[in-house]
Amino acid sequence: MGEKAFFNWSGGKDSALALYKAMLSNEYTIQCLLTNINRVHDRVSMHGVRRSLVEAQTASIGLPLVTVELPEEPSMQEYETMMLEKVNALKTSGCNKAIFGDIFLEDLKNYREQKLKAAGIECVFPLWKIDTTELIKEFIDKGFKAIVVCVNEQYLNKSFCGRMIDASFINDLPSTVDVCGENGEFHSFVFDGPIFKQPVQFNKGSIVNKKYKAPKAADDNNEHPADYGFYFCDLIPV
């Protein structure tokens, strides 16, 4: 029996591969999958996937789902307060480790480590500093299946949204885009693979574009920073 841990689950490919590696290591006893949910739309924050599909994912994996119920556009303070409340509850239940699917973003890793250290929890990064081309090849070779549910229009056009992640998808990515989307270029939903008892069933719905207000820095003299947009492919549970 390994140390008790919770896994920070987005439902996407990096999460799935990191969970797979953590399970194989036998170093951790994973208690639950922790996911941020936009409670207004009942969907995973940033990815836009319906709550019911994440519930189907976690049921197939065989781990409990724990959610952080976020408002539509939480401030950083709101987010951190709600996350810390959930993390403290997991710590009380015996979890001493938090596992993440981050690959190479140093500032994000440092942020996670700093915040969770204050709660007495150590962060674990099974994919850290592994070459992303190697990771995406391993993901596909291991039999994982994923669909792109969100693309950042600053990096990719609408045609990439709703595509399966396979060799063809990887070959079509511009050279400026990380093959794992580690810079936020795209997000995915994993529906089958070695950690699943059975595939998660869904139909592809419509693709929509949603604009968000660009965050305004305190020293930014631009009164109206440009909006930025994402394409989302709706997945409809079967």
Image (cartoon, rainbow, N blue to C red):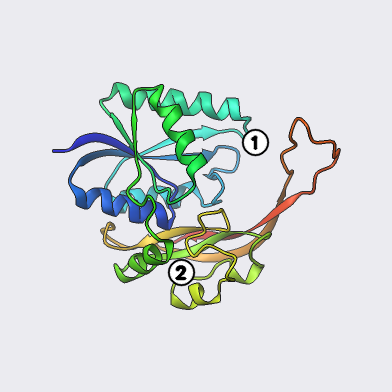
Q: Considering the image in quadrants, where does the N terminus appear?
A: top left
Using residue 71 as the reference point, say whether residue 138 is left or right of it.
left
| Residue matched to label 2 | 165
Q: Mark 1 or mark 2: which is in front?
A: 2
Q: Residues within 10 Å of mark 1 (few under 14, many from 20)?
A: few
Q: Considering the image in quadrants, where does the C terminus appear?
A: bottom left
Residue at x 17%, y 46% (from the top left corner): 26
Q: How many marks?
A: 2
Q: Position of residue 131 (x, y in %)?
A: 40, 61
The correct choice, above or below, for 46 with respect to 83 in the image is below
Residue at x 52%, y 52% (from the top left corner): 49
Q: Position of residue 172 (x, y in %)?
A: 55, 76
Using residue 17 as the reference point, say whether residue 154 is left or right of it.
right
First in sequence: mark 1 vs mark 2:
1
Residue at x 40%, y 45% (from the top left corner): 9
Provide the secondary structure element on which disc 1 rests.
loop
Q: Identify which amino acid the numbered label 2 is placed on.
A: Ile
| Residue 6, picture quadrant | top left
Q: Position of residue 213 (x, y in %)?
A: 74, 43
Q: Position of residue 201 (x, y in %)?
A: 40, 63
Using residue 85 as the reference point, say whether residue 199 is left or right of it.
left
Label 1, label 2: how far apart the Cα atoms are: 29 Å
Camera-side residue of 217 and 31: 217
Using residue 210 as the reference point, say whether residue 27 is left or right of it.
left
Residue 73 — which label?
A: 1
Residue at x 30%, y 21% (from the top left corner): 92
Which residue, as the protein is rendered here, is positioned at the far left?
A: 1
Q: Identify which amino acid the numbered label 1 is placed on.
A: Glu
Asked whether the residues under the numbered discs 1 and 2 touch, taking CB atoms below 8 Å apart as contact, a structural biologist would say: no
Provide the secondary structure element on which disc 2 rests.
loop
The correct choice, above or below, for 163 with respect to 155 in the image is below
